[in-house]
Image (tube, grey):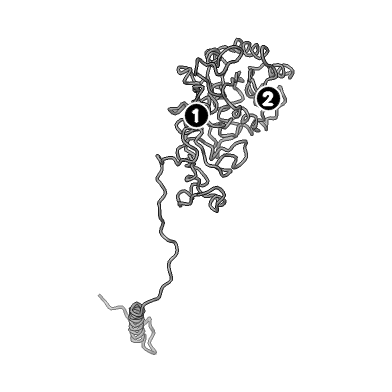
């Protein structure tokens, strides 16, 4: 189990500061500075990177943070959110769970199972009661008194109520934990709901996505560990620092939307040229998330639109798994593209004789006028400067 792995490494106790942990475990300072440059982590601290922000400034804040104990529960899910977490590279996953946070319980990653896993959960809850952060992945089945999912003889509702009741804060990671996700799609046989539906009065942060960016979760955890506060949220309990824009605002295909260039069929010429996917059912104009600027796994273009697929609106409760994939969404915050455009080319025609005559007449008048004026000017100069007379000898008339 993770607890045994921690004990094997001769490091400071789990709740030491991040700086202490890094020094004792011989973790590279450079590696930590790379981690600190991530905007997704810096933003919750009000340290959004600018030209003047140094990684050392961010590290000075995060280094003093007491490593937060984290308990991670799984319910109705595909484990995709955990898989996303496994792919982090700044820090690497091992550094993340062993040095940045203290992951006390995670059913997918721990070696123990059955009674041994239940014991580890009970011990972590008792040791860090009122201090641990609970991360929930997956929806909770409420139908038929919760019989659709049980763990150790307890329903998912009972487990969440027990563990969540002793948590300092709760993070619902993924669309399933946020509001039901795929299991809640029609006809929703299990009565799947999100964490906030079951524990409405708790301090809960929703981080929807299928999957969400793991750095968003990490940023929320570190902010709470640093000063006991949670980031500012919108009306759906999503942290604004990560869900403050819609996909469409910074989509690399936005220029094609404005120009009316739309993909009609997958694989057509427009699709190959990177045209807009709106008419293919892209939900980007109605979806708030940072995917277009914060790609997955630190690899450019690793997000749906980046690989040529439309956004499905997985971070929106009213869109994700509710609106059919190829149905076009209504445009609420942006104007629809124009239906026609002025031509940028002109047809070649002939010049009429009348137009030619008028132009010729105009040119002749200008030429004649210029010639007459030049002759008058020349004659005046000849009169003023008679031969044998110094041009500067004329006396100025007396007033």
Q: Position of residue 316 (x, y in %)?
A: 47, 32
- Numbered circle sitting on residue 185: 1
Within 10 angstroms of label 1, few (less than 14), some, or many (20 or more) residues? some
Q: Would you identify the image quadrant in which residue 138 lies?
A: top right
Residue positioned 50% across, 15% down in the render: 145
Q: Is residue 131 left or right of residue 379?
A: right
Within 10 angstroms of label 2, few (less than 14), some, or many (20 or more) residues? many
Residue positioned 48% across, 44% down in the render: 278
Vertical order, 155 against 256 (above or below):
above
Vertical order, 67 against 332 (above or below):
above
Residue positioned 47% across, 32% down in the render: 322
Q: Position of residue 197 (x, y in %)?
A: 46, 20
Q: Which residue is mark 2?
A: 22
Q: Position of residue 365 (x, y in %)?
A: 33, 80
Q: Nearer the viewer, residue 185 or 101?
A: 185
What is the count of numbered marks?
2
Circle nearer the N terminus (1, 2): 2
């Amino acid at each position: 189990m993770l607890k045994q792995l921690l004990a094997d490494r001769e490091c400071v106790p789990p709740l030491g500061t991040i700086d202490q942990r890094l020094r004792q475990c011989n973790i590279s300072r450079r590696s930590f500075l790379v981690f600190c440059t991530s905007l997704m982590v810096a933003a919750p601290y009000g340290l959004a990177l600018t030209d003047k922000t140094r990684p050392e400034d961010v590290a000075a804040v995060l280094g003093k943070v007491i490593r937060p104990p984290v308990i991670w529960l799984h319910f109705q899910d595909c484990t995709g959110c955990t898989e996303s977490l496994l792919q982090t590279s700044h820090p690497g996953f091992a550094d993340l769970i062993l040095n940045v946070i203290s992951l006390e319980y995670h059913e997918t990653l721990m070696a123990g199972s059955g009674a041994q896993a239940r014991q580890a959960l009970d011990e972590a809850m008792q040791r860090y009661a009122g201090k641990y952060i609970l991360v929930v992945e997956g929806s909770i089945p409420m139908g038929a008194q919760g019989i659709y999912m049980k763990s150790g003889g307890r329903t998912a509702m009972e487990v969440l109520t027990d563990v969540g009741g002793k948590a300092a804060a709760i993070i619902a990671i993924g669309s399933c934990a946020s509001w039901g996700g795929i299991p809640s799609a029609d006809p929703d046989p299990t009565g799947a709901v999100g964490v906030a539906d079951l524990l409405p009065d708790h301090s809960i942060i929703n981080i929807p996505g299928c999957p969400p960016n793991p750095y968003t979760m990490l940023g929320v955890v570190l902010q709470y560990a640093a000063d006991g506060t949670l980031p500012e949220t919108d009306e759906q309990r999503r942290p604004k620092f990560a869900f403050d824009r819609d996909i469409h605002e910074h989509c690399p295909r936005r220029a094609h939307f404005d120009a009316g260039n739309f993909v009609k069929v997958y694989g057509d010429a427009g699709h190959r040229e990177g045209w807009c996917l709106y008419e293919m059912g892209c939900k980007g104009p109605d979806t708030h998330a940072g995917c277009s600027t914060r790609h997955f796994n630190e690899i450019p273009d690793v997000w749906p639109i980046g690989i040529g697929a439309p956004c499905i609106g997985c971070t929106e409760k009213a869109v994700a798994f509710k609106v059919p994939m190829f149905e076009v969404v209504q445009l609420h915050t942006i104007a629809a593209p124009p239906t026609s455009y002025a031509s940028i080319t002109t047809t070649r025609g002939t010049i009429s004789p009348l137009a030619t005559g008028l132009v010729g007449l105009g040119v002749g008048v200008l030429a004649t006028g210029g010639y007459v004026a030049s002759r008058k000017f020349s004659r005046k100069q000849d009169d003023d400067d008679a031969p044998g007379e110094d041009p500067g000898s004329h006396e100025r008339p007396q007033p």
